[in-house]
């Protein structure tokens, strides 16, 4: 017999809960991103999840409008943000006169898109954006590459390549090919080069922008140039040195490569890739995509670029800028699917067995001494038999257990057990507990 | 002439942006809460902002239903969560068989309530909850008091008092007064004692629950008992020792006071307060409210209690628990209103002047050396005159500036300036920069 009064506990389709074994690595990733961004002087901001619909609509094209969670509330037409860029544009228009430029901000937060769900794609996910606005200086573009590098390292993703390009190079190229008027359409086709075949890209370019096969062959030959950064730069200078736009793009890329090398980024981490276009129309300069060498099929995990004007829809103030966004939840979902996440059920490494219910003050007293030294300690809440308490400790993933009963309190000792190595417990004087625990956790 | 094509950049009424000077302390507070919760073995979880409306409706009473942001989306009746407790109940019903008990979780996240806005109250605000479920042990209740204590200390709120009571004591009392049937109504009136006069509370008790003035006088005399914890306990034992419920409540409170003292909580921090009832019907045992001695009028900043069954609406599994919630954004708004927040515009303490545009690699190289040691460094993006760069640095609140021009690079030196003390800059050899900067920041 089922109880018909119970409400079925379930989440909406496309949404999911984060239990500890997912949320512990997710929080860790968020913290790494914050630490890296702060290290460069990016300051945090937050904006509301809900905005007036007019702020959000029509900014990402028709497709994106359809995905927006939009509704009426007390006669107000409102919607949930679908990215952090549009809210930042609105924020900048509203506050930049107070904040002043250059303004460097990071923003971590959930966004909502009612898109078709597939593996690893959810309708609610966190983005981690950083941008510098109010400057056209290449120093800011160079910094974005440094931040992405440090971010990947902080996330322990050692094998990655940051692909960089400059839209000026592509624009100059298209100008030379007589395709200046079709730039947006051509680049949108080009952006699909990693997903579909060269032939399909050419067909689409012909259909959408009237690009001849001669034009598309020349374009694709060039953007598919392989070789070292220096070789690609040489070819560009040779073939497009005369084009002012392309020349400026090449100069900025060259400067970026030299400065990042000087600042200590190892060879091979930053790679010139003329095929990177980024589909979004608003990029106008440097563009970035970041691929994990061991997980290429998940696509770019950190992408961005330079734009001419962030907030033109809301203010007359011209706000050029450059930034990128870490696709944190997509990265997490990929690592999860590949079983690359460590399954940890507790953020505290030390477990105190509750041997005697009347010694809670002593157990919590020891726990507090360790916590003051930055060591997390959980005291089991029930004075159950020791077996079930150890089973719980093992399931959660604690590393060290402390046990003390009446005899130990009389002697002033604690028994310490290495749960990871399943070693026998050993008695330690009260005063030595901290150093022994530290040793076991080191 | 105004440009009619511009969209006015504005937030919804009752919502607000968090610029760096608000977001820096807000993130710091969130981090303190996470650190303290983790230190006790509470593990993080997250749940979607959106839930099926049936999950959320009817859980907080009619008033709360009216405040819910609810809408139809592709024929689904959905809503934004208005607290973190109901989603936790749904989460627990869904996952507890996998997670096992006891289960200790913390959850930080925004919630949405379309309530009337007033100073310091917004329609979107973060809550920071922690709970232990799956145990009725008083050890978990004791721990809640310890967590609240450590949380307040971590937030640098040194002067605070945690008021504790036990609903069993109040229930026993009402039983003795012949008011057992009207418990919920009477306690809801009692909960207003800090906001309205004793006389008004008595009037309301009479009107809502038919309480005679003799009954309400006896009740209010008792709950308004002043004196030390020991004196209040003595009076309770003397007057209500015979009542089984009250006796059990007193026993648990006595144990909590003894264990927290033993664990090292200073005298006076935890205060027995029989007038604390917590309006919510589902509390059944220990209840907690936390008041700041210097800001009493903002009310309790961290409140909670023990409940018999968390998820009874969604599952037959009985899940007793205890926990509390930090009203983070309300606390932040209060500190802001009282001008107690330090105005900092950058999370990085060190500023590198961009003296020569062609030395970006060197500037970022030095910055990276310092960042590796955990010191945040911003490099100014434009090679402007030094005056405007220092104005920017001062406005943002950097503490130390590094300057190097061609001569310095030739000599291998950097000029260091203490921005806080506005001291003259001094030249330092490249190898000594780290230690000098560390000294200035210490």
Image: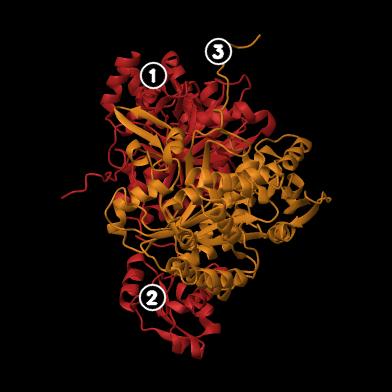
Chain colours: A red, B orange
| Observer-nearest of B172 and A89 | B172
Element on which disc 1 rests: helix
Nearest to viewer (mark 3 / mark 2): 2
Check the picture and name the quadrant holding the C terminus of chain B.
Answer: bottom right
Q: CA distance from mark 1 to mark 3?
A: 25 Å
Is residue A32 among the parts visible in the rendering?
A: no
Q: Residues within 10 Å of mark 3 (few under 14, many from 20)?
A: few
**How many labels, in total?**
3
Q: In the rendering, which numbered label is found on residue A185?
A: 1
Same chain for mark 1 and mark 3? The answer is no
Q: Residue A348, image x and y in percent?
A: 45, 65
Q: Quadrant of residue A212?
A: top left
Taking the view exactly as shown, the residue that stands out farthest to the left is A1
Label pair 3/2, CB-CB below 8 angstroms: no
Quick check: B212 above or below B436?
Answer: above
Residue A383: give its label: 2
The residue lying at 33 percent from left, 69 percent from top is A392
Q: Identify the residue at image location x=64%, y=47%.
A: B197
The residue carrying mark 3 is: B5
């Amino acid at each position: 017999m089922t109880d018909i009064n119970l409400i079925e506990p379930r989440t909406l389709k496309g949404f999911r809960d984060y239990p500890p074994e997912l949320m512990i690595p997710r929080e860790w990733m968020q913290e790494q991103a914050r630490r890296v961004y702060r290290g460069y002087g990016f300051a945090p901001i937050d904006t509301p999840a809900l905005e007036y619909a007019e702020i959000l609509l029509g900014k990402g094209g028709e497709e994106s409008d359809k995905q927006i969670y939009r509704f009426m509330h007390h006669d107000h037409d409102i919607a949930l943000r679908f990215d952090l860029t549009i809210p930042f544009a609105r924020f900048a228009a509203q506050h930049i006169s107070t904040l002043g430029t250059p303004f460097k901000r990071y923003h971590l937060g959930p966004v909502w898109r009612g898109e078709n769900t597939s593996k690893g794609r959810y309708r609610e996910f966190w983005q981690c954006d950083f941008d510098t606005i109010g400057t056209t200086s290449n120093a800011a573009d160079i910094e974005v590459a440094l931040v992405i590098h440090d971010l990947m390292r902080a996330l322990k993703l050692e094998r990655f390549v940051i692909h960089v390009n400059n839209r000026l190079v592509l624009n100059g190229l298209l100008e030379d090919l007589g395709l200046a008027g079709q730039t947006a359409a051509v680049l949108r086709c080009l952006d699909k080069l990693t997903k579909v075949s060269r032939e399909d890209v050419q067909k689409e370019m012909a259909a959408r922008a009237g690009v001849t096969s001669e034009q598309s062959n020349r374009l694709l030959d060039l953007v598919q140039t392989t070789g070292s950064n220096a070789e690609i730069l040489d070819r560009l200078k040779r073939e497009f040195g005369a084009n002012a736009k392309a020349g400026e793009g090449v100069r900025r890329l060259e400067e970026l490569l030299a400065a990042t090398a000087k600042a200590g980024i190892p060879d091979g981490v930053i790679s010139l890739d003329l095929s990177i276009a980024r589909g979004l129309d608003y990029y106008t300069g440097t563009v970035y995509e970041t691929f994990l060498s061991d997980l290429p099929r998940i696509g770019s995990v950190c992408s961005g670029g330079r734009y001419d004007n962030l907030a033109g829809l809301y203010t007359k103030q011209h706000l050029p800028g450059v930034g990128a966004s870490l696709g944190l939840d997509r990265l997490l979902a990929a690592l999860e699917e590949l079983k690359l996440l460590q399954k940890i059920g507790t953020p505290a490494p030390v477990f105190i067995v509750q041997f005697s219910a009347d010694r809670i003050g002593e157990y919590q007293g020891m726990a507090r001494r360790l916590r003051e030294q930055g060591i997390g300690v959980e005291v089991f809440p029930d004075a159950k038999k020791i077996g079930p308490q150890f089973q719980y400790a093992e399931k959660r993933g604690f590393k060290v257990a402390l046990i003390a009963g009446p005899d130990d309190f009389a002697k002033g000792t604690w028994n310490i057990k290495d749960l990871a190595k399943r070693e026998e417990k050993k008695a330690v004087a009260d005063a030595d507990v901290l150093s022994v625990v530290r040793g076991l956790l080191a």
